Amino acid sequence: MPPIITHHTVVQYVFDGSFPGLLTAVFESYAARHDIVTLFEQDKVRNNFFDPVIIITTAPEKALRVWNGLKKKLTTAQQVQYYSAFLAEDTVIIQQLFNYARYVFDHAAGAAANYGHPAVMAVQQMAQKVSRERHRMTAFVRFQKTAAGLYVSAVEPDYNVLPLICKHFKDRYADQQWMIYDGKRKYGIYYDLQTIHEVQIEAAAPGAIVHAAEILPDASEALYSTLWKDYFKSTHIKERKNTKLHIRHVPKRYWRHLTEKQPD
């Protein structure tokens, strides 16, 4: 006999981990009138045999209704914060994003500015961390030209910030084909002079956007790397060296992807 679920029963929602999946979970919680929901991604479920488990099937139309509803309640900056916090890929923040949406919908306009609410504060703080990582990526990305003329950069950001840096690099390098690949998450963004595509480099099958051969460095790339290193050295003044400050602005975890940090 299935358990009786009331408005005040703690219910476990399991979703696919996607942003539309999160928004669908918010929709279903209202449709089912579940007030107390613990949200988990499929691979991060911590079973509590006393709480009913409901599998959330992502429904784009339901997710869009929730997002459009949030847009009526949030400023543009708050919308960016909400999505940025999601890109942190943090289990705790996923729950806070769910709670945030419920809180905003259940209260009058302006609720998202109430930083005394734990979900609002958590989302705002996480969004700031993701924003700092986004800013670092716009500064630390170094492209290398491949034999096929494609400019490639490998990165491993702490957070999934590629969706947040697309426009920056499209505007800045509009006349070049380029790809930024996130080695940590095994996907990249590829610009073909017209559109940005999400790509994976698992296979170099015929018709794939990016082939393995395109990752071979161009013969002139070594020269450009040397010139960049020389420039970096020429602007480096020993008397003003401050290693602690330098590491604060350019953390060591980024160094292996920076041309100027590679050995000569």
Image: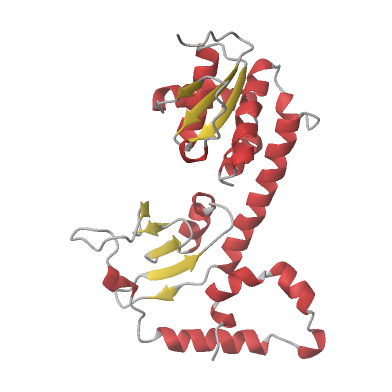
Q: In which quarter of the image is the C terminus?
A: bottom right
- Whole-percent x and y of residue 260? 58, 82
Residue displayed at 35% across by 70% down: 150
Residue displayed at 58% across by 8% down: 6
- Whole-percent x and y of residue 135? 63, 58
Q: In this view, does 156 lie above or below 82?
A: below
Q: Say which quarter of the image contains residue 115.
A: top right
Looking at the image, the residue that sits furthest to the left is: 206
Q: In this view, does 144 lie above or below 123?
A: below
Q: Which of 146 and 187 is in front in this view?
A: 187
Residue 18 appears in the figure: yes
Q: Say which quarter of the image contains residue 91.
A: top right
Left or right of 202? Residue 96 is: right
- Whole-percent x and y of residue 10? 61, 19
Left or right of 132? Residue 191 is: left
Residue displayed at 73% across by 74% down: 246
Q: Quadrant of the N terminus?
A: top left
Left or right of 203? Residue 89 is: right
Q: Say which quarter of the image contains residue 117.
A: top right
Q: How many discs appear?
A: 0
Residue displayed at 59% across by 74% down: 255
Residue 68 appears in the figure: no
In this figure, which colouring scheme has been used for the structure? Answer: secondary structure
Left or right of 11? Residue 114 is: right
- Whole-percent x and y of residue 152? 41, 69
